[in-house]
């Protein structure tokens, strides 16, 4: 890799980050990723506290497949923004309920 290509890459990154909408989208995706990862690992951590770990793992896998299918259908029919808002609302409510009341 030459220093000229490094310079070109840094200019492209600087130009992209100078746009306000790119900064807002980047920040939003960081927050969304953080929320998703937190809820995912919280559920996996709590799933290991059950007596029948393998059954819970199988049920969680099936639930993941169903959620991917439903998410794709929702995104196609109602748009990505609405689907994200609905998904994160449900996820946030479920996460708060799990934290407050347990399973």
Image: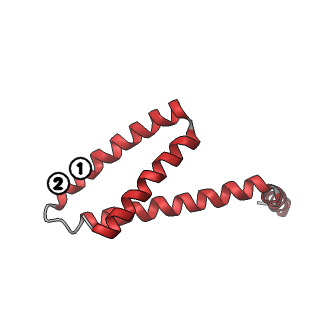
Q: Say which residue appears at 31% left-offset and 63% top-offset.
A: 44
Quarter of the image with the N terminus in it:
bottom right
Most foreground residue, 14 or 38: 38
Q: Position of residue 27 (x, y in %)?
A: 65, 61
Query: In the drawing, does residue 68 fall left or right of residue 80?
Result: left
Quarter of the image with the C terminus in it:
bottom left
**C-alpha distance separating marks 1 and 2:** 6 Å
Q: Position of residue 33 (x, y in %)?
A: 53, 59
In the rendered image, the vertical position of residue 13 relative to residue 66, given as above or below: below
Please, which residue is most extreme toward the top here? 77
Mark 1: secondary structure: helix
Instruction: State which quadrant residue 98 falls in.
Output: bottom left
Q: Say which residue appears at 53% left-offset and 33% top-offset.
A: 78
CB-based contact (under 8 Å), mark 1 and mark 2: yes
Q: Which mark is residue 55?
A: 2
Q: Position of residue 55 (x, y in %)?
A: 17, 54
Q: Which mark is residue 79?
A: none
Instruction: State which quadrant residue 93 falls in.
Output: bottom left
Residue under label 1 = 59
Most foreground residue, 5 or 65: 65
Q: Residues within 10 Å of mark 1 (few under 14, many from 20)?
A: few
In the rendered image, the vertical position of residue 26 relative to residue 46, given as above or below: above
Mark 2: secondary structure: helix
């Amino acid at each position: 890799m030459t220093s000229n290509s490094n310079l070109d890459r840094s200019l492209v990154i600087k130009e992209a980050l100078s746009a306000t909408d790119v900064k807002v989208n980047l920040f939003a995706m960081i927050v969304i990723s953080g929320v998703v990862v937190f809820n995912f690992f919280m559920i996996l951590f709590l799933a290991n506290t059950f007596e029948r770990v393998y059954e819970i793992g199988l049920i969680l896998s099936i639930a993941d497949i169903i959620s991917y299918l439903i998410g794709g259908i929702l995104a196609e029919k109602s748009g990505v923004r609405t689907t994200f808002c609905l998904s994160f609302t449900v996820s946030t409510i479920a996460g708060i309920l799990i934290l407050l009341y347990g399973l």
